[in-house]
Each structure stands twice: as C-alpha cells, then as structure tokens.
Image (spheres, helix red, strand yellow):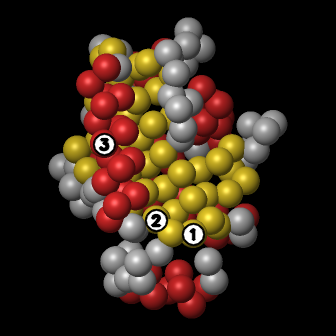
Amino acid sequence: MDLITYRKLKESGYKKPNLTTVIHDPEMILGMYLESLSLPENELNILWNQQMFDFIVTNLRETFIRIEKLSRTKGIKFRIVVELSEDNKWFLKSITYCEVRQTDAVPENLQLIDTKIYLQPVIEPDGNGISKILWSNSVDLVNQKQNQFDKLWKTATPTQ
C-alpha cells in the first residue's frame, strides 16, 4: 500500500477504496496495527496464537492496556480468543474489560474491527516483530473471517 492509498483510506474512515493488500513497509505495519486497535467504534474481535500473544505482552503491553481502557470508555464490545498457557494467565487476569476465551489452537492471528475491516498480522519467525500485515475492507473477506471468529468464540472456554 502506498501513502496516497493510505491517506484515502484514512479520510474515508477506511471504507474506500475497497482494498485487500499486504503491507510490508515496517513503519506502515506498526502504524496500521496500532491504529487498528484504537479504530473500532462498536466492536473489536481478536484471535492470537501463542507467538502473537507473547509478542503483544513483551512489546505492546502498555499499548494494549490503553486500548482496553479506550474500549471501556467508548463502550466497545471487545473479545479475544487466545491460546492459553501457564505463562500468560497472569496477563489475562489483568484484563478486566474485554472478554477473553481460550482454546488449544488458534489457526491464525486476526483482528476484526466493527465487522468492516480485517487485519492479519504475521509474526517474524523469531517472534520479535510483525513482518507483514494482510489488510482488507472487502465485505466478503471480512464476513468470512467474522464467521471464523464466531465459531471459534462459541467453542472456546472462558478464562474467568
């Protein structure tokens, strides 16, 4: 995605142009990922595998806590499905606003923003960064991923 397309998306509230793209630029990756966490108006749904969860806790913990508080303030429905381990239970207990469920396997990392935007971060093999992001506002793809999230949500176990 180039800067002009990014500006057009941002100006339109991420509605236009209709786009599915892979973002490789490191600065744009971090910007789009962090912005996506604060963008929701109604709902934020997240799937994190263990590697992504570890990355968030290690590198973006304070940002995540701010996003949780922002979601509470805005009244956003905030749900996360994670691969739970003994190592991450302490952090999950500190999350008080969003609903968290656990499962044995998360097939992919994704974020769904207001059932309008789909974002899939891909973690570096060493777990120390996001190497690329698949970003889409395609209605069909967003609906497909929302259905995937909803099915996993129903089968996952509440953590608290």
Residue 159 drawn above or below residue 115: above
Label at residue 156: none
Which numbered disc flags the more N-terminal residue, 2 or 1?
1
- Residue with the most extreme right position: 126
Residue 107 drawn above or below residue 129: above
Residue 44 drawn above or below residue 156: below
- Residue with the most extreme left position: 75
Residue 123, x across and y down, in percent:
69, 44
Q: In which quarter of the image is residue 102?
A: top left
**Residue pointed to by mark 1:** 21
Query: Left or right: 100 with respect to 23?
Result: left
Which element is circle 3 on? helix
Disc 1 marks a residue whose amino acid type is Thr
Residue 64, x across and y down, in percent:
47, 43
Would you say residue 137 is visible in this rendering? Answer: yes
Disc 2 marks a residue whose amino acid type is Ser
Which residue appears at 72% of the width and 47% of the height? 129
Which numbered disc flags the more N-terminal residue, 1 or 3?
1
Q: How many labels does the image show?
A: 3
Residue 87, x across and y down, in percent:
59, 14
Q: Are marks 2 and 1 in contact (CB under 8 Å)?
A: yes
Which residue appears at 41% of the width and 41% of the height? 46
Q: Quadrant of residue 139?
A: bottom left
Disc 3 marks a residue whose amino acid type is Asn
Q: Distance between the residues labelled 1 and 3?
A: 21 Å
Which residue appears at 53% of the width and 41% of the height? 109
- Residue with the most extreme top position: 86
Would you say residue 65 is visible in this rendering? Answer: no
Q: In which quarter of the image is residue 15?
A: bottom left
**Residue pointed to by mark 3:** 147
Label at residue 136: 2
Query: Local crowd at mark 3 within 10 Å, few (<14), some, or many (≥20)?
Result: few
